[in-house]
Amino acid sequence: MNFSRFNAIVALMGASALISLQAAVKDLPVKKVNGRLYHYYEVPAKETVYSLCYKLDIPKDEMIKYNPAVADGLRAGMTLFFPVEGQEESTGQTTSRVITHKVAKGETIFGIAHKYGITTDEVIAQNPVLKNGLKAGQTLQISVAGPAEEPAAKAALESSAASVAAPAQQTEMRGYIVKKKETFYSIAVANGLSVAALEAANPGVTSLKEGQVLNIPTAVPVSGDKNVADNGGVPAPDKVADGTVAVEPEVAQNELTAPAQAQATSIAVMLPFMLNEETLSKNAARYTEFYKGFLLAVDSLRNSGTPIHVTAYDTEGSVLKVREAITDSTFRKHNAIIAPDNASQLAILAEYGKNNGVKVFNTFIVRDDSYLTNPAVMQGNLPSANMYRKAIDALMERLAYSTPVFLTLKGEKCDKADFVADLRRTLDAKGKTYMDVEVDGRLTSSDLKALPADGNYMFIPSTGRQADLNKMMPGIIEWRDQAVTPTVRLFGYPEWTTFRGETLENMHNLNTTVYSRFYTDEESARTAAVDAKYKHWYGSKMENAVPRQGLLGFDTGMFLIPYIVKGEGGYDGVQNGYFFTSPGEGAGAYNDALYFVTFRPGKVIEKARI
């Protein structure tokens, strides 16, 4: 390619970027400041100049031109201003103010417009979400003539203090047009929101389509970060060797990890591979799959800057084998131990870890609580009591505009009684109204006729069994479709992530959210990449189980190896997440990761860490 043609292409690309810039900035909300109209953008926490330039499709110098303080970096709470094109200079003192109006039951658009002295068209133009109808509980932004607003803003645009921080407790709404293939989760992350906050601001919206308008609340806390890791693969022996298997990847410099000359990281994987058995048992095959997945992580981290040694020990399900391993002088080289699924063997390793300063990673015994008193133990599963509390706290956010309805089947065992009782206590403590529906046999639409037809409802069954769920969902769907107006959602339990067929279809139909320690999105690129590497190196697919042991091994390695090297960090994995916290002084740590998985209409599935 000659240089003149190259320069022409660059110029065209620049022109294209400028057109996109104008379109992106024009999508921002508008406010009048000292007689002039400006598009404005409130900076959420953890936004960077680079990410914002990318989001708005705007060159950095263009952003700094109107907001000089951006040259020193962005701060959460800053408000950036961009002048609206084509407006005439104003010499008058006409200004406006924005009033937040919460829609009461029975109100109409005409009545609201009349109250504030504007037309219905103006109300709709200022609140595009009204194109989908008006509902009680919605929050509208009404712009009316009034005293000058934010006199400091003009000075901010003309000085190095180029932003005005929004009031700490103020929440404002702006319209957002949904783009193709966007989800609640992607929109929430892009706008510095939690999924709960986005859903609470749009109580009547259950699914998304291109061109739809959403309310976007500002000054809302940002949801947690995600760390996305590379996926790779490394071959493992057809059968795990008795004794040790060492893996030493290539060493390369990487600015995110220790230098190449750093001491090697050594990890012991102690599992019942049962090599003494003639026929490989199902359990032994699963632990072998876990180990293979772990080696995929080792290969993905081969350029981390630190040599990685992995030693596999076949415990043969024996306490004697564990004691034999830890008394060998070579065992002292290990920085961490992945413990087996036996409580007695874990106790031995936990004591060893405490006495020798070695981390003991427990990912197979959910109910073990030795982490409470042993600083060496890392409990890889969120404890049940903590899980209930975390799920309930996150659910309470989603109930801001919904009435909880507890569903019970008469005569059936309420296997979720503990969770439901804890949720009821929380609702009572916060003064939140809820309802109860008990049915005999199968839920029908007539069982729900007592519910007002214009409400927003979150149905919460007291059972997690699939057979019981199938007795409830058709009746809820029938009642919702007959009543037309109510907004209906369903909340459920971890085992629901395994349901398939008609049950899963109905879960999507009811916009169902469940809580779970882990979840695998089988359609994601990350899952596909790990699956492809696993099959490439080992010649077979992972077992179709929940959880998948190969993915558990991969995610464990992707978290644990960098953690041992750096002593910190979290990891949002393909299937499992790891974000550890300590319950107190002298204790170990437990994994605080929990997910809300939402099955939305249109077979869309969203996974969000809470």
Image (spheres, rainbow, N blue to C red):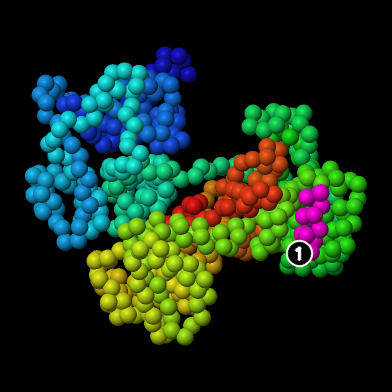
From the top left corner, tell me how far across and down residue 198 is, in percent: 36, 50
Badge 1: how crowded within 10 Å, few (<14), some, or many (20+)? some
Q: Give the camera-side residue of 568 and 596.
A: 568
Query: Where residue 574 sits in the image (x, y, percent)?
Result: 58, 51
Assign the magenta stretch its main secondary structure.
helix
Secondary structure, mark 1, is loop
Q: In this view, does 554 lie above or below 285?
A: above
Q: Residue furthest top?
A: 4
Residue 106 % position (x, y): 16, 61
Q: Give the camera-side residue of 465 and 43.
A: 43
Question: Label 1 is placed on what type of residue?
Answer: Asn
Quick check: is 29 in the magenta stretch?
no
Q: In this view, does 406 lie above or below 237?
A: below
Which residue is found at the position 43% from the left and 57% from the top? 604
Q: In this rendering, would 388 be left or right of 350?
A: left
Say whether residue 340 is left or right of residue 91. right
Question: In the visual, does 261 lie left or right of 73?
Answer: right
Residue 318 picture quarter:
bottom right
Q: How many labels does the image show?
A: 1
Query: In which image quadrant can residue 452 be found?
Result: bottom left
Asked if residue 554 can be seen in this view, the reply is no
In this rendered view, identify the residue nearer to me: 248 or 64. 64
- Boundaries of the magenta span: 344-355
Residue shown at the point (43%, 21%) measured from the top left: 72
Is residue 412 visible to us here?
yes
Q: Is residue 347 magenta?
A: yes
Residue at 15% from the left image edge and 58% from the top image edge:
107
Residue 158: quarter of image = top left
Query: Residue 557: x percent and y percent?
Result: 68, 47
Q: Residue at x 43, y 81 (%)?
A: 409
The residue carrying mark 1 is 342
